[in-house]
Image (cartoon, rainbow, N blue to C red):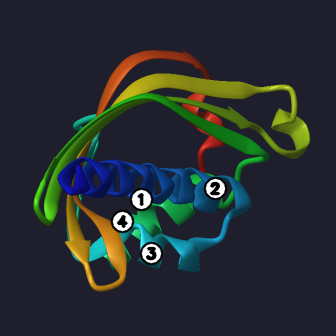
Amino acid sequence: MQQMLDTLRAERAIKATLVTYARACDQRDWRLLDSVFTDAVAVDYGGEFVLNGRADVVAMIKSMLGGCGPTQHLLGNFTIDVQDNAASCRCYVRAVHAGLAEQADTYYEVWAEYVDQLVHTVEGWRIKQRSMLVHKEVGSRAILKP
């Protein structure tokens, strides 16, 4: 019974970490990403952006979202496997991005899946590896700019 409760608590905390990522992006709260990624995180966003280290990952996210209008990252369909202080997680993401100024009527939307490896640290669950599998893109990526 205790093991089941521990697993449920871990799954809830892992979901909270991923939701924190989405909120940090949408609120442009870059410091919040410190509570999402390990220092040595490795990411592969659709094969196009392959980065190592939280500073480089945050810089890339900031450069993409810092110059566009409102965004909304929606997460769902979580599959989580917890093994002691490590976990793997897959979840769907649907992210909508709006343009600014003369591009205010332009949108970019991506339907994808995050495939994450997480580790439990003294600060909580952190993503140590992320891959984004892109399923569909619509609109214009041109609005993603600093």
Report the residue at 56% width, 80% height from top: 31
Left or right, 6 with reference to 63: left
> Viewer-nearest of labels 1 and 2?
1
Which badge, 3 or 1, comes first in the chain's sequence? 1
Residue type of the residue flagged with mark 1: Ala
Residue type of the residue flagged with mark 4: Val
- Residue 23 marker: 2
- Is residue 146 something one can see in this rendering? no
Q: Are marks 1 and 2 in contact (CB under 8 Å)?
A: no
**Cα distance in 3D space between marks 1 and 2:** 15 Å
Q: Residues within 10 Å of mark 4 (few under 14, many from 20)?
A: many
**Cα distance in 3D space between marks 4 and 1:** 22 Å
Report the residue marked by disc 3.
35
- Asked where in the image residue 81 lies, by quadrant, the reply is top left
Assign a secondary structure to mark 2: helix
- Residue 29: % across, % down: 65, 71
Which badge, 3 or 2, comes first in the chain's sequence? 2
Which badge, 4 or 3, comes first in the chain's sequence? 3
Q: Count numbered badges in the picture.
A: 4
- Is residue 64 something one can see in this rendering? yes
- Residue 13 marker: 1
Report the residue marked by disc 4.
57
Residue type of the residue flagged with mark 2: Arg
Report the residue at 49% width, 56% height from top: 16
- Residue 112: % across, % down: 40, 25
Report the residue at 82% width, 35% height from top: 103
Assign a secondary structure to mark 1: helix
Assign a secondary structure to mark 3: helix
- Residue 49: % across, % down: 29, 48
Assign a secondary structure to mark 4: helix
72 w.r.t. 79: above or below: below
